[in-house]
Amino acid sequence: SSIEPDVVHLHWINYGYLHPRTKAKFRKPLLWTFHDMWPMTGGCHYASGCTRYEHECGACPSLLSTQARDLSSRVWERKKAAWRDLSITIIAPSRWMADCARRSSLFSTSRIEVIPNCLDTERFRPLDRAACRNILGLPQEAKIVLFVAMNAERDKRKGFDLLHAAACALRERDPAGRLMALVVGAESIGSDFPFPVRLLGLLRDEISLSLAYNAADVFVSASREDNLPNTVLEAMSCGTACVGFNVGGMSDLIDHQETGLLAAPEDSQDLSERIASVLSDDQRARALGNAARERVLRQNAPALVAHRHQELYRELIEASSQLDQS
């Protein structure tokens, strides 16, 4: 049977989910949420500071290429040809992603709306820290720094090298030896981390993740580039103070010194100092965590985000209907 949707809303379409030319076959209002930069580049998911996508790709740094007509250029040309005449409304989860789309040669004339990701604020909510530590077998007296390390040692964008340098500087501030790293998503992070590490591995359920966020004194993101990281959003919803570099969409989540702390991009020393300022002041950490939770409830609760999508759908459907009748 045929499917007749009122709108078509795309999200992440890579790994063969949808061919670029397929979008031209849709005859309904088309929306696309950009979860990374792939739609506007010649293939990379994050440009790592490269601005060639603002004009046309080629001589791609990710490919170590110096050729104008390389693979990235050919992919970019295919996208341009496939999407030239399409009317696509772009949804960017962060202001940073919206700015990237506006600067891109493929979507600079498209309508772009900023609607953040939503989160189950009941599943990710504040819990008793002592109880969470008991469940996970963590020491009550430790100062626990939590981070997620999925592919961290292989993916430079995740900034594990910057985090490691920050941890080394942080260790010098801990003569009592109370620091402990809690790591989600990795089976190992090397043998030279400067203070004790507890590896939780890959957690596949939200209850376990919520326990980890609530057990920590601070959650740290060291990414060099990111859209609107779900890990930060989840930690904030659990009322855990967060620290990260002021890159990408981080400032959409963290209002510096109000709902968390932002460090200068790629500055490990500054990151270390921000982490230390949270760990050294329990009252401040609680205030940051409480404000973070309130911010998530105001901006990212499912009902609120769904309503913004519904309003946009309704507007596009009405405009499409009027166009069909004219």
Image: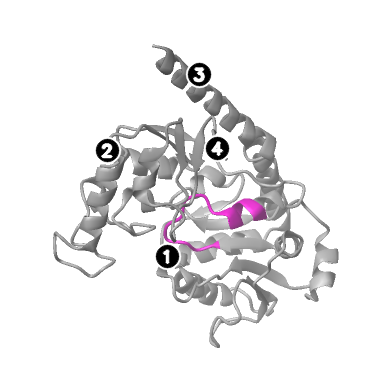
Numbered badge on residue 3: 4
Left or right: residue 132 compared with residue 159: right
Residue 280 sits above or below residue 322 on the image: below
Tag 2's secondary structure? loop
Q: How far across and down, in percent of the image, does residue 320 sit?
A: 45, 21
Residue 63 counted in the magenta span = no
Which residue occupies the foreground of this view, 81 or 241? 81
How far apart are the two marked residues, 1 and 3, measured between alpha carbons?
41 Å
* Residue type highlighted by circle 3: Glu
Tell us which disc is closer to us: 4 or 3. 4
Per the model, the C-alpha gap separating discs 4 and 2 is 25 Å
The residue wearing badge 3 is 318
State the CA–CA distance, disc 2 to disc 3: 24 Å
> Percent x, y for residue 183?
63, 72
Indicate the colouring scheme. one colour
Frontmost of labels 4 and 1 is 4
Relative side of 48 to 15, left or right? left
Disc 2 + disc 3, Cβ < 8 Å: no
Q: Is residue 292 above or below residue 193?
A: above
Circle 3 crowding by C-alpha within 10 Å: few under 14, some 14–19, many from 20: few
Camera sees residue 91 = no
Extreme-top residue of the structure:
326
- How many numbered marks are there? 4
Question: Label 2, on which residue?
Answer: 84
For label 4, the SS is loop
Q: Which mark is residue 157?
A: 1
Magenta span = 221-235
Type of amino acid under label 4: Ile
Q: To which quarter of the image does residue 65 belong?
A: bottom left
Counting residues from the start of the chain, the first of labels 4 and 3 encountered is 4
